[in-house]
Image (spheres, rainbow, N blue to C red):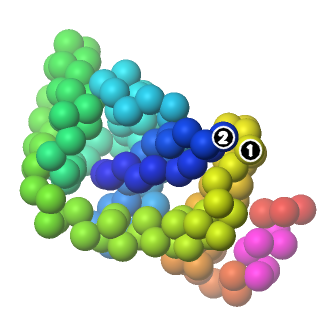
Amino acid sequence: MDETYIRVKGQWVYLYRAVDKFGQTIGFMLSKNWDKAAATKFFARALEANGLPRKIVIDKSGANTAGINAIKRMLKRFGCPVSIAMVRIKYLNNIIEQDHRFIKRRTRLMLGFKSFAAAISTIAGIEVVNMIRKGQFMPDLLPFQQFCQLAA
């Protein structure tokens, strides 16, 4: 899990992203804030959609640490027996750091977005195209065929 920055209306907003150890995209969320509440919301969404992981690798971000600890406390309160290990090593995040370049390559040319809604929809489209390219949806179809089926 990692975050990167995107410019919207001249302000920096935060794009939270998560990938698994094979480089497959787990989730993404655009947020105006980089704090415990935003990190907790992102982790809750990612865990709801993909299940509980054994470990989460993050950089040394305080907001991400606080968000994971909040999720762990919630899981413990509801009686979840699975413990999630949190690893805070900067260099283990290289998979997601390299995955950011596909987003940055597209958004850098735009010189930012004019509205938050436009940024969300554009980044969602970029993420879907990258997920198709990685073969996450239907590996037996060609990428253009997958795109046509999703667009229909």
Q: Is residue 13 magenta?
A: no
Answer few, some or many: residues within 10 Å of disc 2's Cα (few below 14, many 20 plus, some between 14 and 19).
Answer: few
Rounded to the nearest angstrom, the CA distance separating label 1 from label 2 is 5 Å
Earlier-in-chain disc, 1 versus 2: 2
Determine if the magenta segment contains residue 148.
yes
Name the element at disc 2: loop
Q: Which residue is found at the position 19% from the left and 51% from the top?
A: 59
Quadrant location, the C terminus: bottom right
Q: Work out whether 96 lies above or below 80.
A: below
Residue denoted by label 1: 114
Q: Quadrant of residue 103?
A: bottom right
Q: How many residues crowd around disc 1 within 10 Å: few (fewer than 14), some, or many (20 or more)?
A: few
- Is residue 10 visible in the rendered image? The answer is yes
What is the secondary structure assignment of the residue under circle 1? loop
Which residue matches tag 2? 9
Q: Position of residue 80 (x, y in %)?
A: 21, 25
| Residue lying at 65% horizontally and 60% vertically, measured from the top left | 111
Q: Position of residue 65 (x, y in %)?
A: 19, 35
Specify the segment rendered in magenta: 144-149
Residue at position x 81%, y 68% in the image: 149
Dominant secondary-structure state across the stretch colored magenta: helix
Q: Residue at x 42, y 70 (%)?
A: 99
Q: Amino acid at mark 2?
A: Lys
CB contact under 8 Å: marks 1 and 2: yes
